[in-house]
Amino acid sequence: MRSSNPVFSRRGFSRDNGHAGFNAAPQAGGAAVGTNPYATNPYAPQQGAQFGAGPQAPARADVMTIDDVVTRTAMTLGTVVLTAVLSWVLLPVDQANLGKSYGIAIGAVLVAFVLSMIQAFKRKPAPALILSYAAFEGVFLGVISNVVSTYVAPGVVVQAVMGTMAVFAGVLVAYKMRWIRVTQRFYGFVMAAAMGFMLLMLANLLFSVFGGGDGLGFRSGGLGILFGVIGIILGACFLALDFKQVEDGVAYGAPREESWLAAFGLTVTLVWIYMEMLRLFSILSGND
């Protein structure tokens, strides 16, 4: 099962003849032999590991565990938060410095995008590359959050952070309790919805750039609220797919280094959810 996460969808937790790709979800009693290169790994757990259920201790230290994923994700998200706070404090957004701060934020997000694409197409996860992505992404988030909090809706950043945490916790509980079942149909539905959503947002951006104003109106008013909710729901679906990818990687006995890839993918999804939350709460605050 491939994740819809832009990172996981390219790489996954397995390789087939040296090329990236995730081949099949583990079946009851273990991984599907013949479809996954880790299926015959004698150190892999014999039952599917449940994400959020604690470490599935393999016999060797070089096999990925849930603890590895949690640790690397904490490091990556911690880097995002740290650089976001520093950029908030060190890059003022008053009228005299707003243009300069905006320029730094745009440059940072472009660098973050390039680094994410490099990592997405690499055969192996590179911790330095992933942490660098997190640092530049944090600079962008710090400046944008400061601007929104200063000029649009004071206090909205706290709401967006709490909302993102709530979505993460809710999806994790729902996935652990098997209220969400990640199937091929679920994956196909989420991917189709995501493609449609992104195309509409791209059209809105183009109309905004060349036509001025808010383009097609997908980011303001009633339509903005609707599309903000849709974006958050899609982010929640991506989280479920990411949890499935992590669960299968642990069950297959994937190499420990793959936990960095899991951390990278989860960070990308959480940043997306945060941005959608920030946008949604900003619109709601403006409508009060």
Image (cartoon, rainbow, N blue to C red):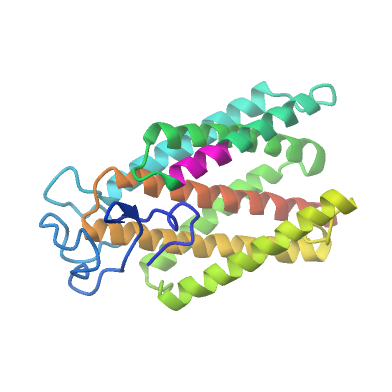
Q: Quadrant of the N terminus?
A: bottom left
On screen, residue 24 versus residue 271, left or right, reads: left
On screen, residue 186 versus residue 230, left or right, reads: left
* Residue 47 vertical position relative to residue 208 in the rendered view, above or below: below
Which quadrant holds residue 74?
Answer: top left
What residue occupies the far right of the structure in this picture?
Answer: 212
Which quadrant holds residue 288?
Answer: bottom right
Which quadrant holds residue 24?
Answer: bottom left
Magenta stretch encompasses residue 116: yes
**Is residue 284 in sight in this rendering?**
no
Residue 196 image offset from top left, x and y in percent: 65, 68
Q: Residue at x 40, y 75 (%)?
A: 183
Q: Residue at x 24, y 60 (%)?
A: 251
Q: Residue at x 69, y 24 (%)?
A: 91
Q: Nearer the viewer, residue 163 or 188?
A: 188
Question: Mostly what secondary structure, the magenta segment?
Answer: helix
**Is residue 92 in sight in this rendering?**
yes
Q: Provide the residue span drawn in magenta.
A: 112-120
What residue occupies the far front of the structure in this picture?
Answer: 17
Magenta stretch encompasses residue 43: no
Residue 232 image offset from top left, x and y in percent: 61, 60
On screen, residue 280 versus residue 247, left or right, reads: right
On screen, residue 170 versus residue 233, left or right, reads: left
* Residue 62 vertical position relative to residue 85 in the rendered view, above or below: below
* Residue 255 vertical position relative to residue 151 in the rendered view, above or below: below
